[in-house]
Image: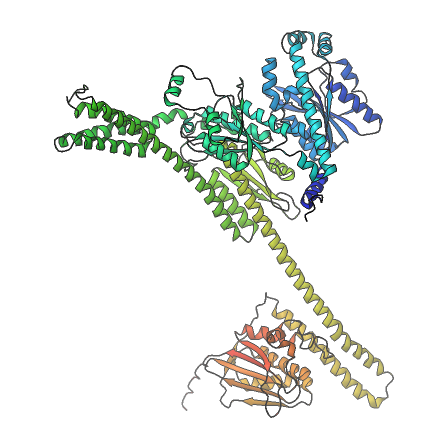
Amino acid sequence: MQDHTRPDPDALIAQMRNDEARAKRGKLRIYFGASAGVGKTWAMLSAAQRERTAGRDVMIGVVETHGRSETAALLVGLDTLPLRQLPYRDRTLPEFDLDAALERKPAVLLVDELAHTNAPGSRHAKRWQDVQELLAAGIEVWSALNVQHLESLNGTVGAITGVRVHETVPDTVLDEADEVVLVDVTPDELTARLAAGKVYLPQQAERAAKNFFRKGNLIALREIALRRTAEHVEDDMRGWRVEQSGATALQAWNTSGAILACVGPHEGSAQTVRTAARLAGQLNVRWHAAYVETPRLQRLDAAQRDRILAVLKLAEELGAATAVLTGADIAQQLTAEAQRLNCATMVIGRPEAATGWRLLVSRMWLQPALALSLAEQAPALDIVEVGRADSTRRLACAPLGLGHRAGNGDRDDGSNSNHAADDDDDADRPRAQWPGYALAAASSVAITLVATPLLGVLELTNIVMLFLLGVVGIAMRFGRGPSALAALLNVAAFDYFFVPPRHSFAVSDVQYVVTFAVMLGVGLLIGQLTAGLRFAVGVSTSRERRAQSLFELTRELSAALESTQVVALGAAAVQRHFGGRALVLVTDATDQLVRPLAPPPGFDASVADWAFRQGQPAGLATATLAAQPWHYVPLKAPMRVRGVLALEPARPRWLLIPEQAQQLATLARQIAIALERVHYVEVAQGAVVEMESERLRNALLGAISHDVRTPLTALIALAESLQTLPPDQHAEAARAIVAQARQLHALVNNLLDMARLESGGGAVNLRRDWQSVEEVIGSAIRAARPALGDWPVQTALAPDLPLVEFDAVLIERVLANLLENAVKYGAQPVVVSATVTPVSLVLTVRDHGPGLPAALHGNEQTLFDKFTRGQAESATPGVGLGLAICKAVVNAHGGDIAAMNAVTDAEGGGAEFTVTLPRRAPPALPELPSS
């Protein structure tokens, strides 16, 4: 039976990793209040003084006293970080010095006014982003925040007070704070402080008392602050219960599903997103935001498209996963997305009240509201309708460089078939449609001219078909607008030229009115359907292009074997998809980002290095150094960050489109994985080479330690014995010394020969000449005679051996080594034979010993490896290089060498080594002159 009380191992591992990450991360304490003047900064400085007295390293990064003497008095004794002076236009702005704080790294750093907007030129656009980097560096940060600066409450507070602030902080910053200290005073006390000049200067206080600091406003803000703090405390309590009770407590707090926020083209969609974020926070569920682009919404101008992208970016900042959907039916697409994401609640904006002709059209066509359509298609879905707010969200034009490109004809979902195509402004788009309208009119004239001679031949119903065919052709080529014009002109032409009375718009038969209506309706319907089909084709083409680019990059990267290939392929793939310029920066052996030798204009290596070290995107279309013209993405592989992808896109707006942002992230991920794969391939190859080198070194040292030490020890002992031996034994000792010296000489010769053969990367320099085989065999026997001793060597040579072209010295060395090997491991007699074929010379050296070891059967070629011996543990001297030298020499001649057990005959078996050398016919001898 399953034990439901046993904790989930995966959950425990995730919890351990989370605890480890939080242990390395600094703590964030936020002093939270309903409005300015409640005493947040005073409370923060008071706590800092207590911590300083207790011995902690407390430093002020930036604190705004606003001229309050009581607050300024608390600065005494606290170390203060000098502010950074940033030039801006005609003046200098003091700003918090983030780099100095990271270098100083105090235990506690006070950074006031969390929602502050940094001056242009700062690393981050907002101060709360500076705080995030400080926390990542392990610094504990204290800050202060008013309730109206929370992004999700910005619209609500603005509607209550009539004053809207533009400096906001995402709710996730407050949610992730380790401590939230509520600083609360009553509205009456706050009003008294304002009147006493403890909040603002007198002239500012007077204006504030009439507007923001009205008692009703303060009561409402206090309630919101208390509720928001209570939500944070509730989250802490829930987390504590989960940690204490494990999975059981988690089940008790489980909810029914996620939230889907519907982003529309109207200006109040930002309020929809904020409300969805608030609901998700209260219910502790994940949430998503989606925008559905229909063929009608495709024709929105640049300002409206920018507003939609800004709202989607706001949703991402508030913690949502965003998506752009395409389809003709908004309700159907949203319902399918909600079912796919398992969402239980959908948040939509309240539609604008229809008046005048809009109300009339709505009633005539019986168009249901979005909420009703959603309710019909998903009866189990909870639908929350958000009230409209007089607020909007827009993109900043400067960072994205939207200027003259803002109105390009590309659709924001990336469905244009060629992103490098036309850059015309929206103002030029109507002019681009004029050829379609002109051809629509021309087609109507052409059909009229063609059908007029056929009036007596064809029925009017068939002539109607001709006009409808023209509408279909125009709709397929030019879309909705020209096809509607063609339908109207065709109805008029059919009425004027073909319906009696002709050349008049009067109608003699009322039935023709039905014909006109049907003809016009069919023409408009065909145009609408064709436009939708063109839109769907564009979307499918865009998706196919994105999938194709990923497929091509994956296929190319799978064949890359070096990091330079990955860099080139990755940059080319990103540049093909996004246009502009792209760079892939990788790390060196010291794990430092390698900067380009010739950086392109606008590229900032310091921003790329920051993105690499922090593992976060930076530059264009981000919250960090957004004024940069380049977008920097860290290449995060499964193990660590492998580099940075830098992109200067041809369409800066594309980086704000969720699908395109996901495409860029996927491309970066593929490049990072390929870099990591190549890195580990190089590591594996290096490890193999190192292991092989270590094996050879150990084998060489093991062989030399035995085979060099033994003759040296014998030589020393024999030399010392000469002093004590009688003169008649000196000759025998001398012969023993010579034998040991020859053995050591042979060993050193083998080592030197192998070093010489491999000195040129394995290439052997041959001195080929036409040689007599009999002479070379005789020379080899004489060279091996010291090792052979009194062993007999038999030769079996064909009587008609021709001259063969080879290096006589090296082949002699091969035969000598084979003879010495036969003496070491075989038994006498040794037989050397030579035969020829039309294309080869075959040399054989055979002994009559026990043959090759049984362990080598089937693996005889391993005998020719370096430092390999027939018997690994043997008293027979040698380091296992003789046969390796033979193989190297024979292979250099283009031949082959093999070892096998000889066929047993009357004299026994033994081991047989066969050398096969290629041969060609010798040159003809010159004719001798006649005497």
- 472 sits to left or right of 189: left
Residue situated in front as seen by the camera: 680 or 508: 508
Residue 566, visible in the rendered structure: yes
At x 60% / y 14%, what residue is drawn?
Answer: 160
Picture quadrant where residue 439 is located: top left
Residue 426: give x, y in percent of width and height: 41, 26
Residue situated in front as seen by the camera: 669 or 264: 264
At x 58% / y 47%, what residue is drawn?
Answer: 673
At x 82% / y 26%, what residue is drawn?
Answer: 52
Q: How many marks?
A: 0
In the figure, 857 relative to 320: above or below?
A: below
Residue situated in front as seen by the camera: 109 or 276: 276
Where is the C terminus found, in terms of image quarters? bottom left
Picture quadrant where residue 222 is located: top right
Q: Residue furthest left?
A: 456
- 737 sits to left or right of 600: right
Residue situated in front as seen by the camera: 59 or 287: 287
Q: Residue furthest right?
A: 724
In the figure, 585 relative to 316: above or below?
A: below
- 562 sits to left or right of 73: left
Residue 164, visible in the rendered structure: no
In the figure, 189 relative to 10: above or below?
A: above
Picture quadrant where residue 488 is located: top left
Q: Residue furthest front?
A: 1
Residue 792: give x, y in percent of width and height: 65, 90
- 317 sits to left or right of 788: left
Residue 166: give x, y in percent of width and height: 59, 20
